[in-house]
Amino acid sequence: MLIKLLNTLLMIVVALSITGVINRTRAILAGRKGIRFFQHIYNARLMLSKGAVYSPTTTVLFRIAPCVYLGAAIVAFLFIPIADLEPILSFHGDIILVAYLLALSRIAIVLAALDTGSSFEGMGAAREALYGALVEPALMMALATLALFCGYSSFADIFATAQETDTNLTIVMLLLAYVFLIIMIIESGRVPVDDPRTHLELTMIHEVMCLDYSGIDLAMINIAGWLKNAIWAVIAANAVSVVVCFHWEFATPLAILGTGITIGCIESLRARNKLSRNITYILTIVAMSALVLLTGFLLYQNIDI
Amino acid sequence: MKLYHITNNTASSVAIADIPVVDYVELYGDLKLRMEDSRYHVAHYFATECERGLKFYIIILDDKTSEVLISSFVPDYYAEGLASLTAVHPQFHPFEREINELYGVHFDRHPWLKPLRFSHDRRNKLSTMDTYPFYTIAGDELHEVNVGPIHAGIIEPGAFRFICNGEQVLHLEIALGYQHRGVESEMLRDNNSLRRTLIAESIAGDTAVGHATAYAELVEKLADRSVESDLMLERMIAIELERIAMHIADTGALATDIGFQLYQVACEALRTVVINTTQAWCGNRFGKSLIRPLGTNHPMTEAKRELIIKNITDVRRRYEELRADILEDHTLLARFEQCGLVPKSEMERIGGVGQAARASGLRRDIRATHPSGYYATEHSHESIVKQDGDVMSRLMMRLDEVLQSADVILNTLASYKPTAKLSAPDYFAKLHAEHLSFSLVEGWRGEICHVALTDSEGNIAKYKIKDPSLHNWLGLAIAVRSEGISDFPINNKSFNLSYCGHDL
C-alpha cells in the first residue's frame, strides 16, 4: 500500500514539475532569469479561488466538460506506475482504458468548444479532433508493442516484467520512448505542433478551445493538462529505465528532466510547423510507431532478419 | 490642353494658380492610359471645398523621371457622378472611397464605395462601424471567422472578416476606422506650427520621425527656405535609425509568431540598443522631438556621433550574425517561403508602396525615385528589391535593409564633423499664400505623403496625410487568399501596417 501511495505521490511531483522545467529551460536558453519554478501552480491556485463566467450561449455541456476532462485524466493517471512501483489501479487490459479515458477527455473538451458557438473555438475543435484521430493509431500501436513484448496488457505488469535486458528489448524500448515523447508533444499541444504561449487565436489548437473558460474551470483544464503530461512522460521514462536502470529513483527524475528539457529546447530552437504540415508530422509518428510494432514483432518471434 | 503641372520633390511649393484646372473627362482618359504603366502611381487624390462646390486635386508620381504630376478639376455642381478610376485602376480605391465618404460624391462603376474610416465629418452619419457592409459568400461549405476589432496582445483595433473553406481562406476583408482621431482637422485647429509638429509625430507612433520629417519638409517648401546640409544629414540619420529599429522589431515579431524564441529575444535586445541610441540623442526612444521645421533642438555633438557609431557598429555585427542564422534555419524557411504571395502584377494594380512593394519586385522607394533632403544632395540611394513577394521576401527586405541603413549611417557619420551649431526651429515662418505644398518621405514602411493648401493669408487651410498603410492594407488581404487561416498572423506581421496611420 505504501508503495502505491509513493507511486501516486511521485506521479504528482512529476505532473507539477514538468511545466516548471520547461519554463526554466526556455528562460535559460533565452538568457532570462525566468519566472518562479512553481509559478504555474500559484496561477492555478489563484484561478481555483475564483468563480467562473459563462457565456449565455453555452449549455450544460460546456459546464460539465472541465469535470469530465479532469476526471478522466485523474483516473488514467492512477493506472501509471513509475518503474518498479505499483500504481493504485491496475487490471488486465488497462492500457486500452487509459488510451480511451484520454480520448474521452478530448471529446468532452471538443464538444464544449463547439457548444460555445464561437468561430475560433470551432476551428480549434476541428483541429484537435483531426489530430486526435491521427495520433490514435500511433498510440495504439505503441501500446500493442509493449503488450506484445511483455505478454501483459496492464501498465503495472508490462513494466514489472520487462526487465531482462537484451539487445532486442533495448532497441524496441528506446524507439518506444521516442514515440511516447512525440505523442506527449502532440497531445499536450507544444511546439512544433501547437504553441501554448501564442496570443494569436487563429494559430491555436488547444488554447483556443479553452478561450471561454475562466477561473476554476480553466484551472481544472490546466491541471488535467499537467496530469496528461505526467502520464506520457512517465511511460516514456519507464521505457528508458527498463533498459538502463529499473528503479523509481532513476525513472522519476528522468521523467521530469528528460521531457522537460527536451520540450524546452525544442520550443526555443525551432519554429512551429505550418498548420497543414502538422498532419505530415503526426503521420510520421504513426509510421514510426508501425515500424516499432513490426520490428518488435519480428524480434519477438526471433525471426532472423 | 495642359493636364498637369509638373514638379518634383525638391522644388518648392506650387502656386495653386499654376495647377491646371482640367476637364475630368480628359483627365480620366489620360489617367486610364497613363496608369497602365507601372512607373506611375497615385500619391494623393482628395477633394476640398471651394466656392463652386468641390475642387479635386490629384498627385501622380513618375518613378522613372522623378517628376510629380499635379492636376485639379472642379466638376459641375449638378453633375450626376464621376466615372470611377478605381474601376480601371484599383489603386485609386481608398481615395475615391474617402471622397465619397466625406462629400457624398458618387463614382460611377466603382466596385463598392464602402466607408473608409468613419470620419466624424462624414456625409452619411447613419453609416457606422456597426453597419459596415461586409462582403459575404453564401454556401453550406463556407464559414466566416471574425477577428477583432479588439485583439489579444498590443495590437491596435481593426476588424478582419475571413470567409473560409475549412482552414483555407477564400477572402479576407479588413474594416478599419476604429482609431480615427481627426488628425487632419486637428492640423488646422490653430496656426501653431509646434503643435502641428507634435501631431505629425503621433500620426503613427512607430513612424514618428518619418511623419515629422514629412511635415517639416512641407513647411520648408511652403516657406521657400532651404535648410543646412548638416541638418538634412542629421534628419537622414534619424530616419534610418527609425528604419533599423522597426525592421529589427519586425524580424523579432515574425519569430514570435512562429514560436521561435531565440530570434525573438535576440531581436528584442537589438532593437532596444537602437532605440536607446535615439533616446541618447534626443531624449525620446521613438525620435519624438528630434525633427522640427527649419531647425533642430537636438543638434548632434561629437559625443553623440561616437555613441551612434559605436552602437550601430555593434548592432550591425550582431544582426548580421542573426541574419546568417535565419537564412539557414530550415524550420523558419518552411514557414515563410511561398507563404502569402503577392505577385508583382497585383502590387502594381493596388499601387503598393514601400518595402512590401519592393519585396514583390516593384521598385518603389522615395529615397531613390523622388529623393529629397540629403538623399537628393549628397547620398544616392540604391534600393533593395526582392522578387518573390512572399513572407520570406518581406523578411529578407528587412534583413537586408537593416544592414544597408546601418552602412549608410556609418559611412555618413565617419566623415561628419558635427558643429552642434544648427539653427533652432522656426515655428513662425511666413508661408506662401495660395500655394500647394507636398512632401514625400520614405518612412520605414514606405512612402509618406503630406499635402497642404494655404489660403490667401498664408495659413494652412487644408492638410492631407497619407501613410503607406493606406495603399498596402489591400496587399495583406490579397496575400492571405488561398492561404491557411493560421498563416494570417505571419502575413500580417510581414506587412506590419499601421491602423492609426490609416485611420488618422
Image (tube, coloured by chain):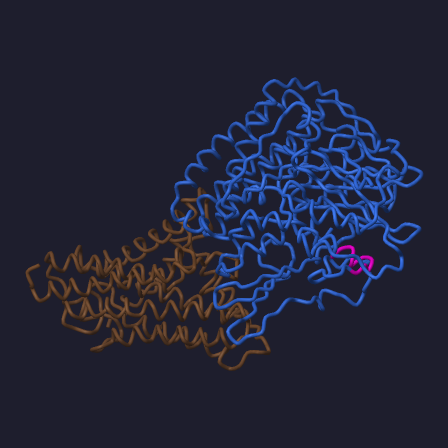
Chain colours: A brown, B blue
Left or right side of A63 for A255: left
Residue B3 at x, y = what percent? 80, 42
Identify the residue at image location x=48%, y=80%.
A61
Q: Which is more toward the observer, A23 or A144?
A: A144
Rendered image quadrant of residue A298: bottom left
The number of callouts visible is 0
Q: Which is more toward the observer, A257 or B47?
A: B47
Residue A156 at x, y = what percent? 21, 70
**For residue A172, above or below residue B391:** below
Residue B235 at x, y = what percent? 69, 30
Left or right side of A75 for B428: right
Q: Report the magenta stretch's main SS.
A: helix
**For residue A186, above or below residue B250:** below
* Image quadrant in which the N terminus of chain B is located: top right
Residue situated furthest front in the rendering: B1
Tell whether position B82 is magenta: no
Q: Which is more toward the observer, A67 or B137?
A: B137
Q: Which is more toward the observer, B5 or B256?
A: B5
Residue B136 at x, y = what percent? 61, 69
Left or right side of B335 for A82: left
Rendered image quadrant of residue A169: bottom left
Tell whether position B104 is magenta: yes
Magenta region: B97-106
Left or right side of B414 for A149: left
